Amino acid sequence: MPISSQIELVTLLEISKALAGDKPLDRRLFAAMRVLAEYLDMRRGTVTLRDMTTGELGIVAAYGLTKQEISRGRYRIGEGIVGRVVKSGAPVVIPNVGDEPLFLNKTGARQESGDRNIAFLCVPIIDNGDVAGVLSIDKLSTRVQTFDAALSVMKIVAQLIAQTLRIERLLETERRENESLRLELKGRYSLGNLIGASKGMQEVFRTVLKVAGSRATVLIRGESGTGKELIAKAIHSQSGRAAKPFIKVNCAAIPENLLESEFFGHEKGAFTGAIAARRGKFEAADGGTIFLDEIGELAPQLQSKLLRVLQEREFERVGGNRSIRVDIRLLAATNRDLESAIREGVFREDLYYRMNVVPIFLPPLRERMEDIPVLIDHFMRRFNEENGKHVSLGRKAVSLLSQYNWPGNVRELENTIERLIVLSEGDSIDASDIPVHVTTAAAESPSGLAATVQSLERERIIQTLSSNGWIYARAARSLGITERQLVYRVKKYGIERLDG
Ligand SMILES: Nc1ncnc2c1ncn2[C@@H]1O[C@H](COP(=O)(O)OP(=O)(O)OP(=O)(O)O)[C@@H](O)[C@H]1O
Ligand SMILES: [Mg+2]
């Protein structure tokens, strides 16, 4: 093979490498032109593309031009040589730009007197039979290379560019499809702020929608952090009362002696410190929804009072004798085992039946593991947005988070994701960033080959650490991993130095 065609091949290979990869398109085109510039002895080069919507031509990447020169280079089809190439789809060679009247010199780049010796070569970029744009170069015309040779290399490069554009377009379509799929999924897997893909949660969503319109009392059960409050809010916002108040009272957080007044209000002078009359939460919720959270913690005396109110639908303020009637919808939640509280005599059975008109049970997260990835996605988006970040989660990290059994349920998962995003330094979170208690729990039940590999790895780490005097940097080097990775594994396997 003659040397010149060998160089040509290497050049084309370099150019196709430059065009591949995941950098933005303009950066890749620029890199490709830099390679081409060296080979063709070119002064300037531009890739001009047609805007799909406006049809206007614009320089997408330029080599040897200033920003100002680029911004001036907007051609309309049919205008100047670039326009002519776009229109005809055939290459144009101007051996000497100084002699060419069609030459618009729109960018104003060719001002030097030396421009007499400059040739202009322009080839179309043909994509799917359409001219998508042009590749053009300014070349010193005194060089030995013939224009034909330069032109044939440019045609190949234009083809490579066309191919790049095609791939780009496919990726863009795929991105858009993924996005709309995601939105569709989100539509199906969410109810307001509630996310859930599992059968259990879908069932919960259905119940919420069914009962929302009625006035039925709903008792929401579930472990801590499973989303009971979120469900109460969803029922309210899906109901005809959505525009009216949603009032929450936490029965566990307010001292017993104050709770009655908190519920029903008090008249002036009802007790020491009652210097003015005050409305209670039941009055505040008139027309809307009252949500009694932690109902299982309600003191027996108040259980009786509440029961009476639910039966008679009216109450008096503390220290008052005027009956007050309100239109409220009652929701209650508890993570307590009410049935055994009844058996132990600490929760009134009759109140239980009053509350338990429609029970909703929220399954713990460990019983609906398929919700974890959807929830992760939801929280990643939310906390990225809140923190102005663009952090993504590696595959391995997702898998570790998905294997953990989340004793603190959705709240724990939510907090973990927020912490990961807030503390992240780069743009991605990988397995080594995941909290150790999560990874060790995930590693606790590996099976078969994975278990074998892990125990071998653990042994090897202990051996290497001990033969390197437990100096982490040295051991890591000898294992061929970073010190950070070593620290992570030591924690993961719970390795301790026994010889002190
Ligand atoms: N299905 C879900 N989709 C999105 N976020 C959820 C979901 N379930 C719970 N969360 C979030 O998890 C956190 C805990 O939820 P919530 O306060 O409703 O739980 P809870 O059952 O009332 O817990 P506790 O018994 O401890 O009061 C909240 O920040 C909530 O937004
Ligand atoms: Mg709660």
Image (spheres, grey):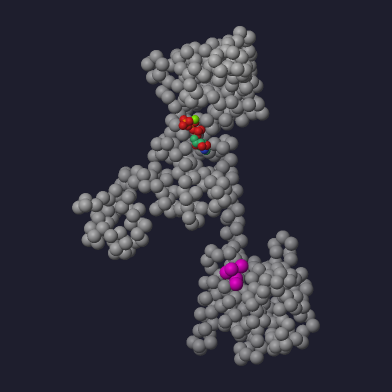
Residue situated furthest left in the rendering: 499
Span shown in magenta: 26-30
- Is 2 on the left-hand or right-hand side of 448? right
| Residue 295 visible in the picture | no
Tell me residue 388's x, y (percent): 57, 51
- Is 325 on the left-hand or right-hand side of 362? right
Tell me residue 7's x, y (percent): 52, 83
- Is 247 on the left-hand or right-hand side of 253? right
In the image, residue 27 lies in the stretch drawn in magenta: yes
In the foreground, 165 or 289 = 289
Q: Quadrant of residue 163?
A: bottom right
Q: How many marks?
A: 0
> At x 27% / y 50%, what residue is drawn?
495
In the image, residue 299 lies in the stretch drawn in magenta: no
> At x 29% / y 63%, what residue is drawn?
474
- Is 110 on the left-hand or right-hand side of 500? right
> At x 72% / y 87%, what residue is drawn?
113
Tell me residue 266's x, y (percent): 59, 15
> At x 64% / y 28%, what residue is drawn?
242
